[in-house]
């Protein structure tokens, strides 16, 4: 019986920490999406124009384009992590209510 209460307390602490992490990540995700898309456009345009004007080698231009694509993919991938965190919090809640 005592072990069950200790486990419940630990699960509530983990739940509180995960909820705080989710709250702290929500604001930067909203503000960061616009910044990351803008940054990705800058990198891709720099890569394409550097290659077009022969300022950099094809390898360096390819790296800039890949980095730009990665920055553009981050805002699309982060909501998946947030949803996974929500599902994990719900599972922890269901475990504490048993």
Image (cartoon, rainbow, N blue to C red):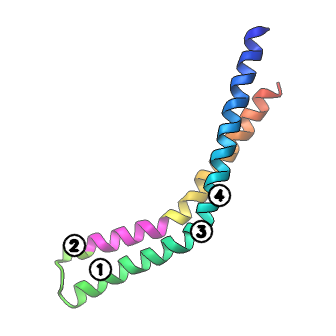
Contact, mark 4 vs mark 2 (Cβ under 8 Å):
no
In this image, 65 relative to 85: left or right?
left
Q: Categorize mark 3 by other alpha carbons within 10 Å: few (<14), some (14-19), many (20+).
A: few
Where residue 25 appears, x then y in whole percent? 61, 54
Q: Categorize mark 1 by other alpha carbons within 10 Å: few (<14), some (14-19), many (20+).
A: many
Q: Categorize mark 2 by other alpha carbons within 10 Å: few (<14), some (14-19), many (20+).
A: some
Looking at the image, residue 29 lies above or below residue 85: below
Q: Dot 4 corresponds to which residue?
A: 26
Q: Gap between marks 3 and 1, in whole Å?
A: 25 Å
Looking at the image, residue 96 lies above or below residue 21: above
Q: Dot 2 corresponds to which residue?
A: 60
Of the residues under marks 2 and 3, which one precedes in the sequence?
3
Where residue 15 appears, x then y in whole percent? 70, 35
Q: Which residues are magenta?
A: 62-73
Q: Residue at x 48, y 66 (%)?
A: 73
Q: Dot 3 corresponds to which residue?
A: 31
Q: Gap between marks 4 and 1, in whole Å?
A: 31 Å
Contact, mark 2 vs mark 1 (Cβ under 8 Å):
yes
Which quarter of the rendering shows the C terminus?
A: top right
Give the number of the mark in front: 2 or 3.
3
Q: Residue at x 76, y 28 (%)?
A: 95
Q: Dot 1 corresponds to which residue?
A: 47
Of the residues under marks 4 and 1, which one precedes in the sequence?
4
């Amino acid at each position: 019986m005592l072990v069950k209460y200790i486990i419940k307390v630990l699960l509530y602490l983990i739940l509180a920490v995960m909820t705080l992490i989710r709250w702290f990540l929500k604001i930067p995700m909203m503000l960061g999406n616009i910044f990351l898309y803008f940054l990705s456009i800058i990198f891709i345009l720099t890569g394409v124009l550097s290659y077009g004007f022969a300022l950099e080698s094809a390898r360096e231009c390819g790296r800039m384009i890949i980095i730009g694509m990665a920055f553009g993919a981050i805002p699309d991938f982060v909501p998946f992590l947030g949803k996974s965190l929500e599902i994990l919090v719900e599972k922890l809640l269901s475990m504490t209510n048993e």
